[in-house]
Image: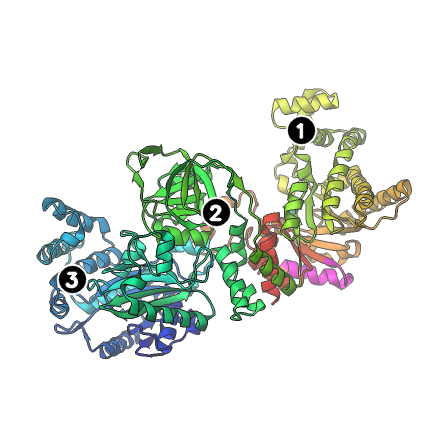
């Protein structure tokens, strides 16, 4: 088997389409090399080696060592160097590189191959001892940290102590001989901690680093990241080994990162940051504040540090030409890393750039206008789930702003919350339902869980490409980065902000669009959907087959959903209409009534309210289909709990509170989710269905008069498992329709259907479809009942299932296509067998999940229905699924 792929010198064994085998970074390095761009020569060890490694007790295939050896030799030939040589030593970087970029894994070891001997050769060659020793000490630090597992800070302490003793402030004040002394201390530290010396043998160093990359695939934070992003562990990571080039060889050297278009706004303009005389990691680490690449960006930022364009015009021009070429080649915005070594430009990475949803939309729409992409291709350039970001609130321009300080606008949207200083605190607060802003000097992959839990992220250090900025953009969280005026004191839990003091727990607002940090909670505006959004949605609508409806029961939700493009209501949960105010008392009266008479009295109170609700909704939906589900309350949600609640109901019913308490106790169920709910309640008390049917029909007549658009209500019966259940309820509804017809003298058009949310309903779909004119798959309950996992209790243990790899995803979030999906497929087929034109939809939470929507397309559902804010996501996902 071929485990190793070479690249460099205008050629490569790999290519961009080999991402699964070579990882994203390796595949693109190969591609750039083949395109003739200056890429330092190197090779990629495939992801298959990673898989092999874990399948075989963390060992390597037999032939790997020989292949790596040969590849190292080839890199040596290309660079005219030799690994470990005392005269012209080859130094390499070792980097991880999975199919998709994954913060949380081991990233990089630089300068590998340095030891007590080779460092002298480097010093001679560079004519710069200080540079050589500085590189060596960085290598020891990095290698000890990521490969040997020693704490980075212990090394920093040695440096700090030296500076203090000699009254120096900057690392750059330390001279060559002093670095040499520090290196000895570093080595002694390693030996003391590990009881063996720092490895001097370059081969040992190389294999140590390769092993560390593969091991990092399974470190907890990488596992967490994969879980959060639904990435399978089976993918594995590749390892990239590449000849070193140095951005820290003096003032004609530099290193930087760039995007071919602005990743925040999508504007077509080269956008990036660099540092003179620095190594790659310095830019992302956010320790020094980077400079702008172009003059335009520098001027816009009002910065006085010169741009790359001004400082190194030739290297800049060359770089710009590669940016254009790579963007045209990949037909997508690129995120690039480069290094300039003594004036010579080297390309270290290219990949599709991460971007905000706003930028993704603009870039996709612009690229169609530029003739680069077709409309259909553009539809695939925006990740449906990312649209969520556009639907985030922004600060009301009219609101008063008490600006504490301003940082970089690193990720759009605005958020308010209480200050917390650690990710664990953020997570804890979230679990307690508190909203927080995570405030850190800078973030690292260890903070992913806290960033997830927080409403927004604020850092005092780092640029637009710092960890905080990149990760927040990916998550769609507001982020203000690099707010340098803030002095964050973790120990005392305070922030000094230009003379003002903030404490943990204080409420602030961050504005990711302007970079402002504001005191207190500030008024927000709900988003308006921009022109690009409409354009892309228009293309998506033309591309999709399935309809998109919404789950809504309030006029407000119905309105929002229509603005987002909902084409009807797929689920109106009538029990949700009963939670408000006075109504709940009437509902309790109905539930607690001991006689049909008592129930009818309570229902009579509810009828006018229901009728008004339905009239409003029919009017808003203006002729679009509306599916109304008859009452489906798990009883425990409605039963009065406190004495006060019991008293209220007793008063309304004119009943004895004590007798009522007995009745409530008698109604209490061991397992309400599997109890007397859904159609079971309607079978026991058909008068409920009658009241609701009357309200629906009368509202339909009323609304049609107002809007002039005919209303064809779809009445849906919940939790059906037996055809007989539906037959009984259907009979009552049909009878009510006749009654309303004769009372009003109006023709009524309506459909009666059922939810499929029990395995038995799916299995007996052929029989049930004889009565049901439509099915709506209620995948919340169908998942609950197929797995036998309570949807209310699942959260406490499903996380463990995911981290142990038993389940890849939470089946209540993304449809279990194999199991629950098979039941859906059975339901579809059998339902159509007796009623070929049966209308089919889905209304569980999965109706707004892109992967589940793809599944719905594949089984041929007619529509998906989801919560209002998910409607745009569903429209786009449905188009991607259909095309
Ligand atoms: C379902 O079970 O999928 C459903 C939509 O109904 P509910 O969530 O109201 O039980
Ligand atoms: Mg249900």
Q: Residues within 10 Å of mark 1 (few under 14, many from 20)?
A: some
Which region shows up in magenta?
823-839
In the image, taking residue 149 as reference, residue 123 lies left or right, namely left
Q: Secondary structure at mark 1?
A: helix
The residues bearing labels 3 and 1 have C-alpha atoms spaced at a distance of 81 Å
Which of these two is toward me, 445 or 205? 445
N-terminal of the pair, mark 3 or mark 1, is 3
Whether residue 595 appears in this view of the structure is yes
Question: Residue at (74%, 51%) from the top-left corner?
Answer: 625
Q: Residue 413's mark?
A: 2
Please give left or right for residue 788 compared with residue 165 in the image.
right
Give coordinates of residue 648: x percent, y percent: 67, 23
Marks 2/1: CA–CA distance: 47 Å
Label 2 crowd (10 A; few <14 / some 14-19 / many >=20) = many
Instruction: Name the residue beneath numbered marker 3.
Output: 131
Does the stretch in magenta take in 810?
no
Q: Which secondary structure is most common in the magenta stretch?
A: helix
**Label 1 CB less than 8 angstroms from ligand 1:** no
- Are the residues at dot 2 and dot 1 in contact (C-beta closer than 8 Å)? no
Q: Viewer-proximal residue, 807 or 605? A: 605
- Secondary structure of the residue carrying numbered label 3: helix
Mark 2 falls on what kind of element? loop
């Amino acid at each position: 088997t071929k485990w190793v792929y070479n690249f460099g010198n205008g050629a490569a064994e790999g290519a961009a389409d080999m991402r699964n085998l070579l990882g994203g970074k390796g595949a693109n390095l190969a591609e750039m090399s083949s395109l003739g761009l200056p890429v330092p020569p190197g090779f990629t060890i495939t992801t298959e080696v990673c898989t092999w490694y874990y399948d075989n007790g963390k060992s390597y295939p037999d032939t790997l060592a020989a292949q790596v050896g040969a590849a190292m030799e080839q890199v040596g030939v290309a660079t005219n160097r030799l690994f470990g040589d005392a005269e012209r030593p080859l130094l390499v970087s070792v980097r991880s590189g999975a199919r998709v970029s994954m913060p949380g894994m081991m990233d990089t070891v630089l300068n590998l191959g340095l030891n007590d001997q080779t460092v002298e050769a480097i010093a001679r060659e560079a004519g710069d001892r200080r540079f050589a020793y500085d590189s060596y000490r960085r290598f020891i630090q990095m290698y000890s940290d990521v490969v040997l597992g020693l704490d980075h800070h212990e090394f920093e302490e040695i440096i700090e102590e030296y500076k203090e003793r000699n009254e120096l402030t900057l690392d750059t004040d330390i001279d060559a001989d002093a670095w040499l002394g520090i290196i000895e201390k570093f080595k002694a530290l390693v030996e003391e901690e590990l009881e063996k010396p720092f490895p001097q043998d370059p081969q040992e160093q190389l294999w140590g680093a390769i092993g560390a990359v593969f091991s990092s695939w399974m470190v907890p934070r990488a596992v967490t990241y994969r879980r959060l992003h639904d990435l399978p562990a089976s993918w594995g990571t590749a390892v990239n080994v590449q000849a070193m080039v140095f951005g820290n060889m003096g003032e004609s050297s530099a290193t930087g990162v760039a995007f071919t278009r602005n990743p925040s706004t999508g504007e077509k303009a080269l956008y990036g940051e660099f540092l003179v005389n620095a190594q790659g990691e310095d830019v992302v680490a956010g320790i020094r504040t980077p400079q702008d690449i172009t003059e335009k960006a520098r001027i816009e930022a009002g910065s006085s540090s010169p741009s790359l364009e001004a400082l190194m015009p030739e290297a800049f021009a060359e770089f710009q030409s590669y940016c254009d070429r790579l963007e045209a080649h990949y037909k997508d915005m690129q995120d690039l890393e480069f290094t300039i070594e003594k004036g010579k430009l080297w390309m270290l990475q290219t990949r599709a750039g991460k971007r905000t949803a706003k930028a993704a939309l603009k870039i996709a729409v612009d690229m169609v206008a530029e003739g680069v992409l077709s409309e259909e291709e553009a539809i695939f350039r925006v990740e449906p789930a990312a649209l969520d970001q556009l639907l985030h609130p922004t600060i009301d321009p009219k609101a008063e702003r008490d600006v504490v300080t301003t940082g970089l606008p690193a990720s759009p949207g605005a958020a308010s919350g209480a200050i917390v200083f650690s990710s664990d605190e953020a997570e804890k607060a979230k679990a307690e339902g508190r909203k927080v802003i995570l405030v850190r000097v800078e973030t690292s992959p260890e903070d992913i869980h806290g960033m997830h839990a927080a409403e927004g992220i604020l850092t005092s250090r780092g640029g637009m490409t710092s960890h905080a900025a990149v990760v927040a953009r990916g998550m769609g969280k507001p982020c203000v980065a690099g707010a340098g005026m803030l002095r964050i004191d973790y120990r005392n839990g305070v922030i000094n902000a230009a003379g003002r003091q903030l404490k943990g727990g204080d409420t602030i607002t961050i504005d990711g669009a302007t970079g402002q940090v504001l005191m207190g909670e500030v008024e927000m505006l709900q988003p308006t959907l921009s022109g690009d959004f409409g354009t892309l949605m228009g293309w998506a609508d033309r591309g999709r087959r399935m309809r998109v409806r919404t789950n809504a029961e309030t006029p407000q939700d119905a309105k929002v959903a229509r603005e987002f493009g909902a084409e009807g209501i797929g689920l109106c949960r009538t029990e949700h209409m009963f939670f408000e105010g006075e109504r709940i008392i009437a509902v309790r009266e109905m539930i607690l009534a001991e006689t049909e008479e008592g129930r009818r009295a309570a229902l009579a109170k509810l009828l006018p309210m229901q009728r008004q609700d339905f009239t409003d909704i029919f009017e808003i939906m203006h002729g679009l289909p509306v599916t109304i589900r008859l009452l489906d309350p798990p009883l425990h949600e409605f039963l009065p709990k406190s004495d006060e609640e019991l008293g209220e109901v007793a008063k309304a019913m004119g009943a004895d509170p004590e007798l009522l308490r007995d009745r409530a106790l008698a109604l209490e169920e061991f397992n309400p989710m599997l109890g007397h709910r859904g159609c079971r309640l309607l079978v026991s008390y058909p008068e409920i269905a009658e009241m609701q049917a009357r309200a629906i029909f009368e509202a339909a007549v009323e609304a049609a008069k107002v809007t002039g658009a005919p209303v064809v209500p779809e009445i849906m019966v919940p939790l059906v498992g037996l055809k007989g259940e539906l037959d009984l309820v259907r009979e009552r509804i049909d009878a009510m329709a006749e009654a309303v017809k004769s009372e009003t003298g109006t023709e009524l058009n309506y459909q009666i259907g059922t939810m499929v949310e029990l395995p038995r309903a799916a299995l007996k779909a052929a029989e049930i479809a004889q009565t049901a004119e439509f099915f709506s798959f209620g995948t919340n309950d169908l998942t609950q009942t197929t797995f036998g996992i309570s949807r209310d209790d699942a959260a406490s243990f499903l996380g463990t299932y995911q981290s142990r790899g038993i389940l890849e995803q939470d089946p209540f979030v993304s449809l279990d296509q194999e199991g629950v999906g098979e039941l859906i497929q059975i339901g579809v087929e059998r339902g159509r067998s007796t009623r070929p034109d049966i209308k089919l939809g889905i209304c569980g939470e999965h109706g707004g999940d892109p992967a589940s929507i793809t599944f719905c397309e594949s089984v041929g559902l007619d529509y998906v229905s989801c919560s209002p804010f998910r409607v745009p996501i569903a429209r786009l996902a449905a188009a991607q699924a259909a095309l």
